[in-house]
Amino acid sequence: MRPEAGEVRVDIRGPVATIVFDRPAARNAMTWAMYDALDAALEQMAGMDDLRVLVLRGMGSHFVAGTDISQFVDFTTGADGLAYEKRLEATVARLDTLKVATIAGVQGYAVGGGLALAAACDLRLCTPDAQFGVPIARTVGNCLSMANYARLVAHFGVSRTMQMLLTAEFMTAAEALALGFVLPLADPRAFDSRLTALCTRLAGHAPITVQVTREAIRRIVARFDAEGDDLVTRAYASDDFREGVRAFVEKRAPMWKGE
């Protein structure tokens, strides 16, 4: 059975646009259709000269709990995984290269692809229940694109990124705050008003300064984006990846073989 498609909703009010990931029954885990809709929305916004701020947020109590793993059932080769990572990276890069300030409004899980989207935003406002992570070493047995590895290292440093990925543990909102990854935590009751106030402030700033600053930092981070197609292909071509997907769908612990 294929996953319910979900929806990506766009709300534009003056200089501020909001993209809402709407699939709360699955913690807003992204389907292919949702990624396509997100990409189309970002392409539309790239041509909006009057836009100043973009907010990404999830419907309900979570941001984005990654990509829906059941979609990986049909993957049979490393090329399938490479195509997926390039597809995801193209969308994240489109977000990364927008000419407006971007904010991730994070409640609950920002996991896997959700963390990639949050990390590609300029600012992150979250509630105390927010959790960040990429638990693929424990769950599915795949890997990230080199660009997404680079984003995490740029935010957290080598040691903390390695710890998060190898232990497959989640980073709490309090720790993310201590590392400077998120803004001061928002009380859930004041979350919307904090987001609105932040959008108002950013929308009033010099647009060219915002554009140049975003691009300058993007170029610095991009310097660490080395070639890694061979690594992605190896992970997605492995028997362990196929076992990880089967185990996830069957709701059991995977039996890793290192093959």
Image: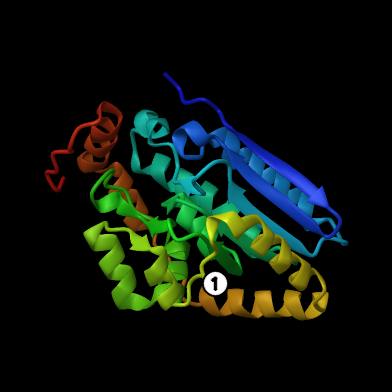
Quick one: label 1, few (<14), some, or many (20+) residues within 10 Å?
Answer: some
Give the residue at the far top of this rendering.
1
Instruction: Give the side of residue 85 with respect to residue 169, left or right.
Output: right
Q: Position of residue 115 (x, y in %)?
A: 46, 57
Q: How many marks?
A: 1
**Corner quadrant of residue 156:** bottom left
**Residue drawn where x is 47% and y is 26% of the image:** 3
**Residue drawn where x is 84% and y is 56% of the image:** 48
196 or 148, nearer to the observer = 196
**Residue drawn where x is 41% and y is 18% of the image:** 1
Q: Position of residue 35 (x, y in %)?
A: 58, 41
Q: Position of residue 91 (x, y in %)?
A: 59, 51
Badge 1 marks a residue whose secondary structure is loop
**Residue drawn where x is 29% and y is 76% of the image:** 159
41 or 55, nearer to the observer = 55
Looking at the image, is 28 positioned above or below residue 232? above
Q: Amino acid at mark 1?
A: Leu
